[in-house]
Amino acid sequence: MAYGTSIDKKWQDKWEAAKLYDFKEDSEKEKLYVLEMFSYPSGAQLHAGHWFNYGPVDSWARFKKMQGYNVFQPMGFDAFGLPAENYAIKTGIHPMDSTLKNIETMEKQLRAMGAMFNWDHEVVTCKPDYYKWTQWLFLKLYEKNLAYRKNAPVNWCPSCNTVLANEQVIDGHCERCDSEVTKKNLTQWFLKITDYADELLDGIDGLDWPEKTKAMQKHWIGKSKGAEATFKVKDSDLSFDVFTTRVDTLNGVTYVVLAPESPLVDQVTTEENKSAVEAYKVETSKQSEIERQSITREKTGVFTGSYAINPITHAEVPIWVADYVLATYGTGAVMAVPAHDDRDFAFATKYNLPIIRVVEGDELPYTGYGNLVNSGEFNGKASDAAKEAIVKKLAENNLGGWKVNFRLRDWLVSRQRYWGAPIPMIHCDSCGIVPVPEKDLPVELPYDVEFAPDGKSPLAKSESFVNTTCPKCGGPAHRDVDTLDTFVCSSWYFLRYVDNLNSEKAWDVDKVNAMVPVDKYVGGPEHATMHLLYARFVTKALRDMGLVNIDEPFKSLTHQGLILGPDGLKMSKSKGNTISPDTYISEFGADVFRMYLMFGFDYTEGGPWSDDAIKSMARFVDRVERVITSAVEEMKKSGKTSIDKAEKDLNFVRHNTIKSVLFDMDKMQFNTSIARIMEFTNALSKYLNEEEKNSAFIKEVVIDYLRILAPFAPHFAEEMWETIGGNFSIFNESFPTFDEKALVKDEVEIAIQVNGKIKAKIMVATGLEEDVIKETALADADVKAAIGDKTVAKVIVIKGRLVNIVVK
Ligand code: ANZ
Ligand code: ZN
């Protein structure tokens, strides 16, 4: 045979016919839920990046199966959302048609990869039998007061014509199309992820996740401990709270600032300042939050004409409006302390506002801590003690207290787009918002709708969709015309995989509890905040409803790196540097492609594609074939039966390979694992050149060799396994274990130094007495010559490694 696609096909068919990958529910074996982030069928093809995610992880799953785990490795499609919709808009083909067609192509490609996906458990999020339960999930959250509607300024992409979640705004630009994001007020559905902010934060430390990702989630949740203080508006009944992390500086407040969007602005602005404030508000609406937070940007603002009263000093300070204060954080109002805050300092300097030092320290602005000055009764207190004392006083006067704030915002889930799960809510003029009864799910997405975006929800244009009757009063009512953020679909898919065919409920609780959490989750680092945070939130909410019994969905997480184009740049069609897996697979076979991906890159780093390197992997696979073929010839002969030095040497490499691969694979270090297999190949090949060979021993070695190779080159190893008469399938074999005794060498090489310079290397038996080693070293001819007529002052022996002779 020669390894290639015909062999791939042969085994893919056999594996499938034998249902080799089925998760056995009644198995005694320990379950192992291996999950790769499902892909969205946006382009028509699997690309090298998909392969890099799925190929190596499949090898890992096969390795674990051979280690005796009952592996569950499902696959599906994240089929709703912007990528599929944009693709449909571009090609003019209806998203349902193009998506299902793309899925078909991708399924074919995934099968050609020979991954042991459990296809019987496939989920496709855009099909009614899936999104029925996405809608059900939404209703459950609504029932528990975790879904609500509010009018809110939202990020609006003028080009995609849609609302974006904060996470989809990158540096003030749309994540998808890079247009500048603006603001718009709309009534939107939110999920109350902030109810779980503390738990989401506290849970992070216990996760076996990349540190960077954990840090990003922590930052995203952004817990900040401070205080709130109430400022009364002078000559008015109005008052407002500020959030501050530096309540110790309360005596240094020389002005306060409201966010331009704050409803208070209109109430406090005096007649003569109205036009300036209005103009400023218009100006602000054009800026993104990111720009507004930029430290280097010149601060701007306007005076409202009103004053506020400091809750402890009773000093009157001017109320300003400035865009560096965000409406969405804290209370949307800030007490400004120019002496101790950089932004406030810049602002006060520009607008000639007073600057009063209240903390001792360096030159102003001084943002550090220290003893208080200019602070009346609090003078002399250190910052921490002063905070305590000031908060106490605020609380006594009902003007404030301690306060914890989170950066995390509630999750905005409504989209004014076509390609998503309709929000299962009905609006009735007499009953208000009425949830669609569970028995009426799914609320089907109508096919015949003008889906190209024009700023309105496409579903609003479908009368047959919009018009319905109120489930409560039976009167005429209309459906919610927004669809759910696709991250809602993917927040629970790992639960549905387990019980994907259940038509009675979203899942059987016992079945799911037996399978979760996901033991190993692998996908791109771009999901550090959104998907990974939403899935954690949904899991916790479902746990509180008694629908799962876990706190965390993904126990262990790995991010694969990025495969770049041959030019070292991110692959993109416009740059013409994309690699299409299909052509390589038909030329070299799936295993060569997979082995190259595993060997050519550090899994978590990725790197540039190299045609030369994949060719050299093809040569390696050829070589393995030749070596195994000649080993098989030798196995048939009757050779010697003794175990001598040559056998021991090969045995050492064999067991060392097993030991290393076991160790490396646990950490998904595919490249070093394959490097060890290459060494093993060399050692076997070398042994086959010996004059006298032990054929029984060769057989033993070949059996191990193929079992080690199997997860990495599944089709090829299965074929070889058949050649040596192994039973189908090699994946029902166990992965070899190593023998520590074989790793103890009879002899070790010891370097001999004279005054620190290596003069000779000698072989000695392991465990030889120190004195004997010394004598042997001194008797060596090269060493003798090096010593010459000098006297030996000292001999230092480092057992098993080195002898150092000090001469004078
Ligand atoms: C007075 C003060 C004095 C402050 C001082 C800092 C230094 P983190 O750590 O991110 O929570 N702040 C509060 N709400 C804000 C908003 N909506 N927009 C912009 N800035 C806001 O930051 C908390 C600090 O950020 C608060 O403490 C407040 O300024 C500001 F010497 O209050 B500080
Ligand atoms: Zn009604």
Image (cartoon, rainbow, N blue to C red):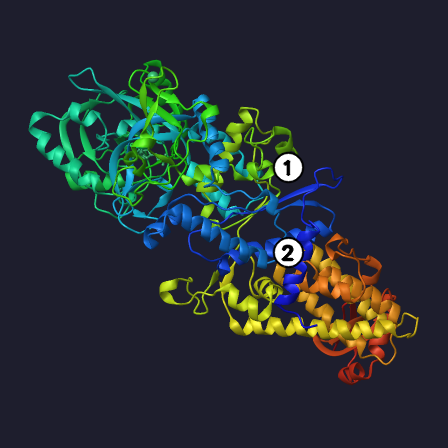
User: How far across and how far down the image is residue 725, in percent?
Assistant: 81, 64
Closest to the observer: 244 or 268? 268
* Residue 692 sits above or below residue 265 on the image: below
Q: Quadrant of ligand 1?
A: top left
State whether label 1 is within 8 Å of ligand 1: no
Q: Check the picture and name the quadrant holding the N terminus.
A: bottom right
Circle 1: is it few (<14), some (14-19), or many (20+) Cα within 10 Å? some
Amino acid type assigned to the residue bearing label 2 in the image: Ser
Query: Which quadrant would residue 464 be assigned to in this image?
Result: top left
Query: Which quadrant would residue 598 be assigned to in this image?
Result: bottom right
* Residue 687 sits above or below residue 709 on the image: below
User: How far across and how far down the image is residue 563, in percent?
Assistant: 49, 61
Q: Residue at x 80, y 83 (%)?
A: 784
* Residue 46 sits above or below residue 421 on the image: below
Q: Is residue 352 left or right of residue 785?
A: left
Q: Residue at x 80, y 71 (%)?
A: 632
Residue at the disc numbered 1 = 515
Q: Residue at x 63, y 69 (%)?
A: 4
Q: Secondary structure at mark 2?
A: helix
Q: Check the picture and name the quadrant holding the C terminus.
A: bottom right
User: How far across and how far down the image is residue 307, in percent?
Assistant: 17, 24
Residue at the disc numbered 2 = 59
Q: Secondary structure at mark 1?
A: helix
Amino acid type assigned to the residue bearing label 1 in the image: Met
